[in-house]
Amino acid sequence: MEAGISRAVQSRHRERGLVLRFIAAQPLGAAGLLVILLMAAAAIFADLLAPYDPEAIDFASMLAPPSAEHFLGTDAFGRDILTRLLYGARTALSIGFLSSFLGCTAGGLLGVASAYFGGRVDLLLQRLVDIVLCFPIIVLALVMVAVVGHRPLLGIDLNLVAAIAIPIVPRAARVVRAAALSVRAMPYIDAARAGGYGHVHIILRHMAPNVAAPYLILLTAYIAQAILLEASLSFLGLGVVEPKPAWGLMLAGDSSNFYQEAPWMILFPGLAISLAVFAFNLFGDALRDWLDPKFRT
């Protein structure tokens, strides 16, 4: 009993020391992580923090400037901008995380399998990756979401998530494959083959865990990319649809018509998008420096 408590206390001390070392070594990354945690908290507790209903229309408060009643003003329908920003954080983070997780996971497994099998399998997969990489990620996302349309489930547009995730797959596969090639040459891979283990076991148990560092870096980096893509698609009318709150959607439509009369309609959603992307990029860069020995000083 006492030994178990002692081990738990030692584990907490190690975790606390790891966090403190990360903050000391990567202060910008820690600042980015703090912003991410604040945005996540705002998204999770939006129902408690938001002062108004995000979809409630109040024509008596149309285009109201920032005031004590509406801290960030209102839009052309009298909807509170602060409320829609809080709920928009839920939309941006949920779609961004799901898209990045699905795209990076599928791409990571594809890259590991390509490196493991090599030969014609690797050649075929990499040529397919090259074909997809010829198209900009925004173009692929536009085409896919325009073709498949919208399919909401539990408040999340699954087709939009897939349209953002699929263009991430070949990009993640290329990066992870480069790391997996060096892992494949390790002696323990040959030992696992000699031990009679199957391909799936070797890929999932021996190769995939050893490319976790680049995978985590890609995951954080592409969350920022996915948030930006979702905002871009919503701005163009192909992403989140009204009246659901989304940062990109708040920049579109009436915001462009009233930018001189009510600049806060564009200013605050634009700041939210920029801050989210900047925070994830800062944290992703710090995570890369922290996990990759080549970048440590």
Image (cartoon, rainbow, N blue to C red):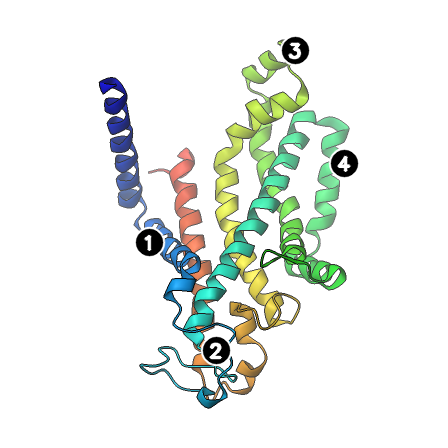
Label 1 Cα crowd, 10 Å radius (few <14 / some 14-19 / many 20+): some
Amino acid identity at mark 2 = Ile
Amino acid identity at mark 1 = Ala
Residue holding disc 4: 124
Residue at point 56%, 72% (across, down): 249
Residue holding disc 3: 196
Q: Nearer the viewer, mark 4 or mark 2?
A: 2
Mark 4–mark 1 distance (CA, rounded to whole Å): 42 Å
Q: Nearer the viewer, mark 4 or mark 1?
A: 1
- Whether 127 is drawn above or below 246: the answer is above
- Whether 238 is drawn above or below 217: the answer is below
Mark 4 or mark 2, which has the lower sequence index?
Answer: 4
Amino acid identity at mark 4 = Leu
Mark 3–mark 2 distance (CA, rounded to whole Å): 61 Å
Mark 4 or mark 3, which has the lower sequence index?
Answer: 4
Q: Nearer the viewer, residue 74 or 263?
A: 74
Image quarter for residue 254? bottom right
Amino acid identity at mark 3 = Gly
Image quarter for residue 237? bottom right
Mark 4–mark 2 distance (CA, rounded to whole Å): 46 Å
Image disc number at residue 266: 2
Residue at point 63%, 35% (across, down): 109
- Whether 108 is drawn above or below 150: the answer is above
Residue holding disc 1: 31
* Residue 94, x across and y down, in percent: 52, 55
Marks 3 and 1 close (CB-CB < 8 Å): no
Mark 3 or mark 1, which has the lower sequence index?
Answer: 1
* Residue 215, x across and y down, in percent: 52, 39
Q: Nearer the viewer, residue 94 or 290?
A: 94
